[in-house]
Amino acid sequence: MTDNKTLQAVRGMNDILPDEAGLWLWFEDVVREWLESYGYRNIRMPLLEPTALFKRAIGEVTDIVEKEMYSFEDSLNGDQLTLRPEGTASCVRAALQHNLLYNAPQRLYYSGPMFRHERPQKGRYRQFHQIGVEALGFAGPDIDAEQILMCARLWHKLGLPDVTLQINTLGDVAARQRHRDKLIAFFGQHSADLDADATRRLHSNPLRILDSKNPAMQELIGGAPRLMDELEDDALSHFEGVQAVLTRHEVPFEINTRLVRGLDYYNRTVFEWVTTRLGAQGTICAGGRFDGLIEQIGGKPQPACGFAMGIERLLALLQEEGMESPPVPLDVYLVHQGELADSMASMVAEQLRDAGLRVLLHCGGGSFKSQMKKADASSASYAVIIGDDEARAGMATLKPLRGGEQVKVVLGELPGRIAAKN
Ligand code: ATP
Ligand code: MG
């Protein structure tokens, strides 16, 4: 039996239609220029990775690994695979696999789809897109601060209002261990007030309790022991180093000691850029330092720092500001009719394109009148009209579509005439 119901996209996975894709293209151009201005180089990783990579990097007891990953067994060979939920793990895997960190640290960026099985809502999708920026092999607070300054520059470039910066430090291993013990003791004393997630995580990953979005848990979390109180001098001075640069550049920030991030690999500096204009999904960009990750994935220990921004949320914010897809204007709509004219039309169109013009060649025939209607409705500045009479004379009619007189032009002079008028 055939099912002829129209097939739909997977829930939470969006088509980006041409009207909106223009905004994406514009955004990607701006972002690329911005990244290059800080010396970051592009890297492209596969969308599928071994499941073990994400479990090891992000942490077994995190929302992403516990309930958001698209993981499956490859039925052809039994491999355990996962559609990447984020890019840092893949990027580090690729850098190690190809020995990129052997000689020098690397500033890398990537962009593309990420996959998380979350409840779809505004600003939260199952396939969404990130620009990821990673500085691998850098230890000092200068790079953390530079990455934050980079973001500030991008918001400025994009004309984004009301984006605020929150920063925190997660310290190093020993401080985290002490904090962990205190959290277990504290939440253990309040076990009756813990929700199911928190109860489950009390011993496996108590830091995750601090990341809970459950409103009923917030008061308890507010009274929990603070990692800030456990920090060692090195981590504190690193954090102060980051703040000093931000202050020097007059980038306002708020220290949010509750900011812990949803992935286990972070240490020391973490940050989020937040807007109040997108409802609950207000974090447009987030990142921090992950000094332990490279070793955890099998490399020799090297510090690193990075961040990722959600493209859908950024574009939603821009659209909120009234931004629309910039039009991509055509130069010429080429109208043609008659045997000779039809046979010449594609040659003329190619010659115009050789001269750098954007040309839409009318295809599919039809009367002059119906072709001219299409030309008028297009975004072209000119119609180039070729009938058999013109074709025999090696000429075309050049008609400005936004006012002005039409003229007959020798075919070879068309590019010059159009470029001169544009
Ligand atoms: P959130 O707290 O909103 O779930 P997160 O901490 O899980 O975000 P990260 O893993 O840090 O997010 O990803 C970086 C950015 O990617 C986020 O700040 C957000 O802009 C975007 N992002 C994350 N998950 C989604 C999603 N499901 N849909 C759209 N954008 C997302
Ligand atoms: Mg999330």
Image (cartoon, rainbow, N blue to C red):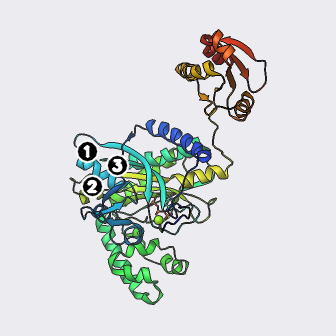
| Mark 1 or mark 2, earlier in chain | 1
Residue toward you, 210 or 411: 411
Image x and y of residue 327, in percent: 64, 37
Q: Which residue is mark 2?
A: 294
Residue toward you, 67 or 388: 388
Q: Are marks 1 and 2 in contact (CB under 8 Å)?
A: yes
| Mark 3 or mark 2, earlier in chain | 3
From the viewer's perspective, tell me whether residue 344 is left or right of residue 306. Answer: right
Name the kind of residue labelled 1 in the image.
Answer: Leu
Query: Mark 1 and mark 2: span between their CA atoms?
Result: 10 Å
Q: Which residue is mark 3?
A: 45
Image vertical order of residue 187 relative to residue 80, above or below:
below
Tag 1 secondary structure: loop
Give the foreground label among 1 and 3.
3
Image x and y of residue 44, in percent: 36, 45
Give the residue furthest to the bottom. Answer: 192
